[in-house]
Amino acid sequence: MNSQDRYICQHAFENDAGHHGAVTPPVYQTSIFTFPDLETFSRAQMKERQHFIYSRGLNPGVQLVERKLAALERGEACKAFGSGMGAIAATLFSLLRQGDHVLRINQTYGPTVELLDQLGAYGVEHDGISGTADIEAALRPSTRIIYVESPSSLLMELADLEAIAQLARARGIITVIDNTWATPLFQKPLEHGFDLVIHSLSKYIGGHSDVVGGAVIGSAEMIDRLFAIGHQLLGAALAPQNAALVLRGLRTLPLRMSEHQRNALRVVDFLAEQPQVLEVLHPSLAVGSAADWAQKQLDGHSGLLSLHIQQPTYHRIVSFIDALRLFRIGVSWGGYESLVVSPMRPDGSGQPLIRLAIGLEDIDDILADLTRGLTALNH
């Protein structure tokens, strides 16, 4: 984590003098911006994506967040959205046409797959592969997008970003990655050749489990296309108050990610030694080619991990989770609090694993709670 990123999170693009020296910029809680005369208004409308006219398009507080996120990812531009799915939907709707194909690599966020299923009604096809070895064979002449999560948010799978980017660029295919697990502090996919980076701002960047948002970062040309189609026409804009909460999260992102990482690595080491645990899934434990990718691509590790317990029946998973007291049961991750969830269902369907989001609590309290859950497996 370098000093440039810390500066971007805390000070870059801010104009204290323009806000009477206030260390926190005001929230521009307005739907419209007015003009002194009709000519000025008309000229602004001719370039509406460059002027404050209507907050569905541009808003000063939202723009500040966008500039910081673009700088953190080393991109030219960013558009922020009302949710992570808003960002994903805007990307797909802006770039895909009838007859196009999307290739997904590794486990993909469930609602993203559901959205791609819905796009089938409009002539868009998609399928997925695990790992990067078979990418070339899976590509079609109609492949328009390669969509990646690395690391993924359930199985913690990694992909070779540079190899994917080189293969895609040679064929004119757009590469898109969900970088929410790592945050821009621990991974910068644009520097490895990817075209677009997506974030759920609801996770680590927001950081307090009190805001929902999303963002897409890339070249100015590509983001302008998303702005014109996926943002303006679909209307999934980030609200000014939510932008202020995201900005607050960015202020402490470097400190929080350091602590998430410190706690998570302690948990990984602890769980790996427990006889009740069959396997721990976390990029810090990657082996073979995945270990090489982790070393090349990741500058750190977030607090999201999964584990397989011995004899992973639904009832044993319930015993572990229900014995926990500090960990709360809930979806999402990236807030201050530790969370636990399992995709396994009472009928035995779903992945038989447990996902842990390691929060900012005292590490001794976290380990004591996990010990409580593991002890329940012995009864």
Image: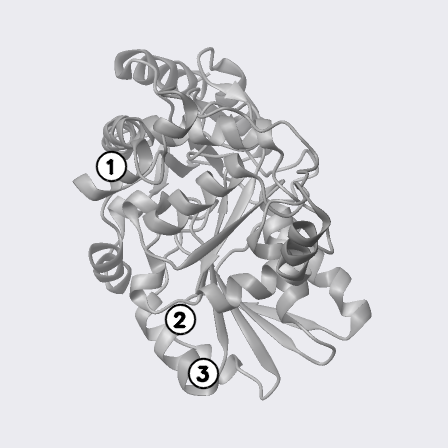
Query: Is 94 situated above or below 374?
Result: below
Q: Which residue is mark 2?
A: 132
Q: CA distance from mark 2 to mark 3?
A: 9 Å
Label 3 vs 1, first from the N-terminus: 1
Label 1 vs 2, first from the N-terminus: 1
The type of residue carrying mark 1 is Tyr
Q: Position of residue 116 (x, y in %)?
A: 68, 62
Location of residue 294 by image quarter: bottom left
Mark 3 or 1, which is nearer the eye?
1
The residue closer to the viewer here, 206 or 307, is 206
Contact between labelled residues 2 and 1, with CB atoms less than 8 Å apart: no
Indicate the quadrant containing the N terminus: top left, top right, bottom left or bottom right. top left
Query: Is 143 situated above or below 283?
Result: below
Q: Which residue is mark 1?
A: 7
SS state under label 2: loop
Extreme residue toward the bottom, this view: 141
SS state under label 3: helix
SS state under label 1: helix
Determine whether, in the image, residue 124 is placed left or right of residue 259: right
Which numbered dot is residue 133? Answer: none
Q: Position of residue 141 (x, y in %)?
A: 58, 89
Q: Position of residue 271 (x, y in %)?
A: 30, 30
Determine whether, in the image, residue 301 is placed left or right of residue 112: left
Determine whether, in the image, residue 209 is placed left or right of residue 367: right
Q: Position of residue 323 (x, y in %)?
A: 49, 14
Query: Is 248 situated above or below 180?
Result: above
The residue closer to the viewer here, 99 or 87, is 87
Extreme residue toward the right, this view: 121
